[in-house]
Image: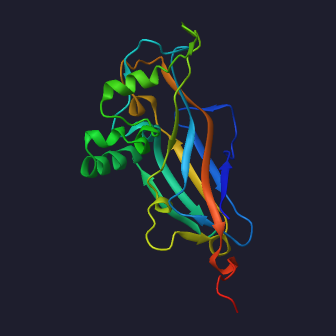
Amino acid sequence: MSIYHSVEPQNLKDNYTEYDQVSFDLSLDEGRAYLLNSIRLEGELQVYEGSAKITTQNVKMDCKIGAHSLFESLSVETNAGLIEHIADYPRVVKQRADATLCRNDMFNSKYVSELRSGDDEITANVLRGFKTLVGSNVTSESFSPDFSLVPDICLNNALGDPLLSAGKVGSLRLTVTLNRVFNALFGAVTSNTSYQVKDFRVCFTSLPSPSNVPSSTPS
């Protein structure tokens, strides 16, 4: 059966910000396999001006990149060593989006969960957070947006057999470096603007390795 995994960073702390390097070790028990194309980066994004969350400031993200803009680089390692390193990662995401997606595509839930949208102004509203209604009253507390994105890495671009046996590759390590504020955000960004990623994690799915799946054909 399939199992859903959630992995915390190796350097666990309350929040992460620009220039932080964050590593996630993905490992499975013997007889399991990674389901390729299922790996996601998730967290909660908070944007600050000084020590307070932004409320009216017109701070934006590139609408075709969304939360991918938070990551300057990504790398993937196995027990055998480094197999992929992507520098200037947001540029890669933007080029692929420009070539394959139109504005209306950005309103698909697949991309909305990545904080992408059809217009940069929408990202400004998203980054300010949202408030809830209790009866007819709006709560004073502002909730920050969370994201769940599929990083554009080799493990999420598999064709053919979607299973990668843990017995063959052992554990996997995904390392991300968080982008500087002025590269991740634009608009009313000042020297006092900052961001934090909270509850940062990697999620993925595993299945039994093919060699451990009982045959459905009677012997």
Is residue 125 depicted above or below 154 in this figure?
Answer: above
User: Please, which residue is most extreme toward the right here?
Assistant: 29
- Provide residue 2's location: percent of width, then percent of height: 65, 62
Image vertical order of residue 169 relative to residue 198, above or below? below
**x and y percentages locating residue 30 in the rendered image:** 74, 71
User: In this view of the protein, which residue sits in the foreground, 190 or 145?
Assistant: 145
- Colour logic: rainbow
For residue 104, side relative to residue 114 (left or right): left
Q: Is residue 104 above or below residue 162?
A: above
Q: Residue at x 49, y 21 (%)?
A: 129
* Front residue of this view, candidates 137 and 177: 137
Q: Is residue 185 left or right of residue 142?
A: left
Q: Farthest residue to the bottom: give it.
A: 219
Q: Determine the image quadrant of residue 207.
A: bottom right
* Left or right placement of residue 41 versus residue 183 in this view: right
Looking at the rendering, in which quadrant would you find the C terminus?
A: bottom right
Question: Where's the N terminus, which quadrant?
Answer: bottom right
Across and down, in percent, residue 105 comes to 31, 43
| Total count of labels | 0
Q: Please provide percent x and percent y for residue 131.
A: 53, 16
Residue 12 shown left or right of residue 57 in the figure: right
Q: Residue at 45%, 29% (x, y): give it.
A: 181
Q: Residue reaching furthest top?
A: 137
The front one of 109 and 144 is: 109
Q: Write the residue at 63% across / 51% down.
A: 24
Q: Tell me what residue is drawn at x 61 percent, y 65 percent.
A: 34
